Image: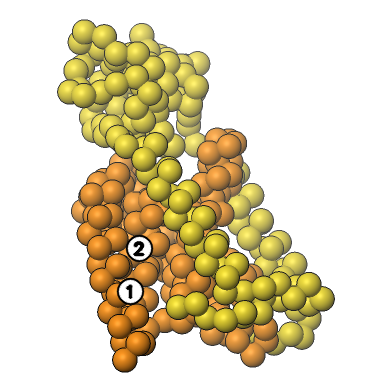
Chain colours: A orange, B yellow
């Protein structure tokens, strides 16, 4: 993974361009694949394979559906869409990175098919952080100025 | 699908499906060969490819070699990688030899892991704070209601 900080800042920029609201929900969606898996298998490495499906498309849909049931009925469908958009953005960013084994298995455990674009190593995403942070700050300032006018 | 009708049942059903998928994934993972299998049957796996599935840790570095731990098993690699240090995390593909040494096919040293971890925790904390500012839990219905939209 490129790291949660990169995921969150990238999501912030995408949300700014796409006008997705509320921001908190979109950012939660973009964190879901990692926060549901990494803490578990960092603490208990034996759960690596147990947590692997959280980075697959099918389970991402189910998890977003599950979370959407904790929102009021009238906004549930919208909450689901926003959460899923965030989760899919996360998976898309993961798709860009290099992985030696087993690569990203997008439909695991139902298929071992793996595919990644292999553009950068996970830790190289840290190099993009200052630029993402700067772009986010500019976006925030522009948004505040527009609100003030 | 998004109605309140049978909501608790839907929640339980989704959790059961997710857990079933995770357990199935776990069972598939258990069937995969581990570094321990190579060590227990060295003749069988001589010259076979060994992949690091999660991560390996550099245990020791010396002149012309370094030791790594994969799945709690130690291996020696007779090679020099510039900048490699004890405690570094590595991933890679290797050729196994029965004397517990490995030849590198492809290997990558993941640097700045601690920095990444700290930044990830900070980002998670910031998003959780934003969520707390945006929603409050209606305890009667276990539903998150919007306080206001800070963005």
Camera sees residue B9: no
| Left or right of A31 on screen, residue B10 | right
Question: Label 2: which residue?
Answer: A9
Give the image location of residue A102, x and y in percent.
38, 44
Image quadrant assignment for residue A11: bottom left
Q: Residues within 10 Å of mark 1 (few under 14, many from 20)?
A: some
Chain holding disc 1: A
Question: Label 1: which residue?
Answer: A140
Camera sees residue A34: yes
Disc 1 with disc 2 on a shared chain:
yes
| Left or right of B117 on screen, residue A135 | left
Calculate the distance from the C-alpha at mark 1 to the C-alpha at mark 2. Answer: 12 Å
* Mark toward the start of the polypeptide (1 vs 2): 2
Q: Residue furthest right?
A: B140
A143 vs B70: above or below: below
| Residue drawn at point x = 77 percent, y = 85 percent | B5
Chain holding disc 2: A
| Residue drawn at point x = 21 percent, y = 24 percent | B83
Helix, strand or loop at label 2? It is: helix
The quarter of the rendered structure image containing the N terminus of chain B is bottom right
Q: Residue furthest front?
A: A148
Q: Nearer the viewer, mark 1 or mark 2?
A: 1
Give the image location of residue A26, x and y in percent.
47, 72
| Residue drawn at point x = 57 percent, y = 74 percent | B134
B56 vs A143: above or below: above
| Left or right of B104 on screen, residue B142 | right
Give the image location of residue A79, x and y in percent.
55, 80
């Amino acid at each position: 993974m490129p790291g949660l900080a990169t995921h969150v800042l990238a999501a912030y920029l995408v949300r700014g361009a796409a006008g997705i609201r509320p921001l908190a929900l979109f950012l939660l969606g973009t964190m879901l694949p990692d926060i549901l898996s990494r803490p578990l298998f960092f603490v208990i490495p034996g759960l690596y394979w147990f947590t692997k499906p959280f980075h697959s498309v099918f389970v991402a849909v189910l998890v977003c559906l599950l979370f959407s049931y904790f929102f009021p009925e009238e906004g549930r469908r919208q909450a689901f869409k926003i959460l899923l958009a965030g989760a899919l953005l996360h998976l898309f960013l993961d798709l860009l990175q290099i992985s030696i084994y087993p690569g990203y298995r997008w439909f695991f455990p139902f298929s071992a098919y793996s595919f990644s674009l292999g553009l950068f190593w996970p830790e190289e995403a840290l190099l993009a952080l200052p630029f993402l942070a700067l772009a986010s700050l500019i976006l925030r300032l522009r948004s505040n100025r527009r609100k003030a006018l | 699908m998004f109605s309140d009708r049978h909501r608790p049942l839907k929640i339980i059903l989704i959790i059961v499906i997710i857990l079933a998928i995770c357990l199935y994934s776990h069972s598939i993972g258990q069937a995969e060969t581990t570094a321990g299998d190579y060590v227990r049957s060295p003749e069988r796996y001589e010259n076979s490819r060994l992949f690091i599935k999660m991560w390996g840790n550099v245990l020791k570095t010396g002149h012309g070699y370094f030791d790594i731990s994969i799945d709690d098993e130690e291996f020696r690699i007779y090679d020099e990688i510039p900048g490699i240090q004890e405690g570094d995390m590595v991933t890679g593909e290797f050729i196994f030899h029965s004397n517990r040494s490995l030849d590198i096919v492809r290997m990558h040293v993941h640097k700045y892991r601690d920095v990444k971890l700290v930044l990830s925790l900070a980002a998670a904390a910031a998003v959780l704070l934003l969520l707390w500012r945006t929603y409050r839990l209606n305890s009667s219905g276990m539903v998150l209601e919007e306080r206001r939209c800070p963005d």
